[in-house]
Amino acid sequence: MTTLRRTVPFVARSGKDHSARILLVDRAELPLAAAGDAQLSATLRRPISLGPADQGIPADEVEQLVEEQYQAALEFVYGHPVWQRIREGEALGAVRAYLMESRHYLAAAPFRMASGITDALRPSELVRLQAHHVVEEADHDTYFENGLAALDIPRDLVRQARPSPVTVEWIHLMRTVAAYGPLAAALCSGLLEYTAGDQKSVAGWHTMLHERGMLPKEAVEAIFEHVETDLGLGHGNNWRDAVRAAKVVPAAELADWLNAVTLVAEMIVRWLETFEAGLSSETVAASPGLQLEGAAPVLGGEADGLPVWPAEIYASYAHGPRSTASGVRRVLALSYAYSGRAVQHGATGNSTTAVASDLVGRTAREWDGRTDEVGLEKLVESWMVAIDGHALWQRMTEDPTLPLVHGYMVENYHYVAGIWQHTGGAVAACPDPVIRNELVKHLIEEFNHGKMFLRGIKKARGSRDHGLTPDRMRPLATTVAFVGTLRELAQRDWKAYVLALAYLQLTLSAAGTTVHSRHEDFYRTLFDRLPESEQLVSAMRTHDAEDTRLGHGDDTRDLLRLLAQRHTITRESVAAAALVPQLAWSFLDGILQHYRHGEAAVLQRAGWHVEG
């Protein structure tokens, strides 16, 4: 009998029927319906307990636990059907998307990795290892730029193309987990480098790309040089070196780091899901022969949220548009990727690039340069398009299920509970005592709202949770990326954080002291469709009413007034803040894409944990 490796379960595509979803526990496939077994939760959680919270785990045991979780996670990642379709030569679009989005991910390496070296008490061996890794990875995007250049795509178009929303999520997830510390950073990046040591398999895969006619030889050689470079630098063993440098890891910390590894695996699979239907491949196919007009953006695509797009555009780029017409796909791809700056000289006024430019002008939300309080309020209100019209709302009002509503509440618990970290970061960063006091006031008023959600969900669920309460559930990777972005934004640019906070607060508030009618309309429609969800959602309604009673809408406008009167607002701050609406779209999309799979999706959030 084969012993299963210790791992959290994953919601994956079946190896037998790629259209079906299953619970994957290491190599074992369980039907989603198995979540209805009352004993399953306890059975799945037993192997992922690390025992008493106050124990330390020596390096050799940590290494074994991490390696088993890596191996199980990679069963999940490499079991995705896109790899088989590529091997069969049927997924040219996926290969193109892989090249472009990998380049964007690698270009952001210093941005997403370096936070792991900044918060240590002293420059230990762990810190040195992570700092060395950052330096070595800093220019690895070059290999994928060279690969794309072999496809006749100008380098300036590659560098200025906006990353897919899901690539941005992945970058910010890695930045967030790196900020936990150098060991967390090493373990999470180690998952990606673990398989590089199997050089024969990796080389065979790259050779296959050329033999199948999917990439020219020059492109394959360029991207394989990245693998050879990583092997030469010994990156496959970085995580082991980090564990050995740590010597002993507290059990509670190791549980967090192992859970972070599983989130990285889940984000990679979410990323893979976008390769065929999403529009990144269309951007690659359309880019040869294009030129860019106008000033190049100052910020990298991982940190610049302008322009803000309607939810439908983010969804189209990530998952594909509702229309299958090739012209629609190309216009949407060029609009999102180049914000109307791409031109094809000699083309007519009805060319694809001209239509794309027109769509940007009519649909995208740019900044008009106004810095007065009214202008700033209108700006952040215009960003509501990123979440208004989101497909999650349609699903919850037309075809809701209790697991979807449960997941929505759990992820909102994780979001609301994160207030200590991101508002706390802004309090620490803000040098203006007047605005700082306003941020402290907000922190005080929101301080216990996470507890409000936790109590409400526990009460509604009762004994049905079998001990799997929200505070013991792994948040989705998209939730961690969203909350982590708020935290690092507060630390990096407190003015941008104030704008982002205003956006988040004004999604709820109407003028005066009443909750915006659209929220109450949403609740009424949901409860009409699914009456049993009312008790579960009561904590959300209580939170909304409490925020309104405390006057958060007026407080938000006061913050914007103080910001406008006392400080200079730059485009860089606006662009940084504008990333929050995009990550808010991702937060909602993660909920929809995961919890639509029913009760198994809730059960699957069980994570590594300690006792006591």
Image (cartoon, grey):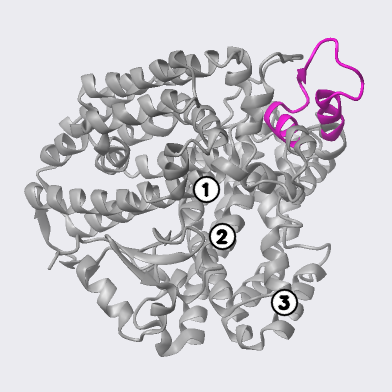
Quarter of the figure with residue 404: bottom right
**Residue occupying image coordinates x 26% and y 23%:** 132
| Cα–Cα span, label 2 and label 3 | 21 Å
Task: List x then y, in percent, for residue 197.
Answer: 21, 32
Image x and y of residue 280, in percent: 61, 34
Highlighted range, magenta: 332-359
Give the foreground label among 3 and 1: 1
Does residue 370 appear anywhere in the picture? yes
Whole-percent x and y of residue 501?
Answer: 64, 49
Viewer-closest of 185 and 390 = 390
Dot label at residue 273:
1
Tags 1 and 2 touching, CB below 8 Å:
yes
Labels 2 and 3: the sequence-earlier one: 3
Residue 523 marker: 3
Mark 3 vs mark 1, CA separation in Å = 31 Å
- The amino acid beneath tag 3 is Tyr
Residue 132 within the segment the image draws in magenta: no
The numbered disc on residue 593 is 2
Quarter of the image with the C terminus in it? bottom left
Left or right of residue 183, residue 508 in this image: right
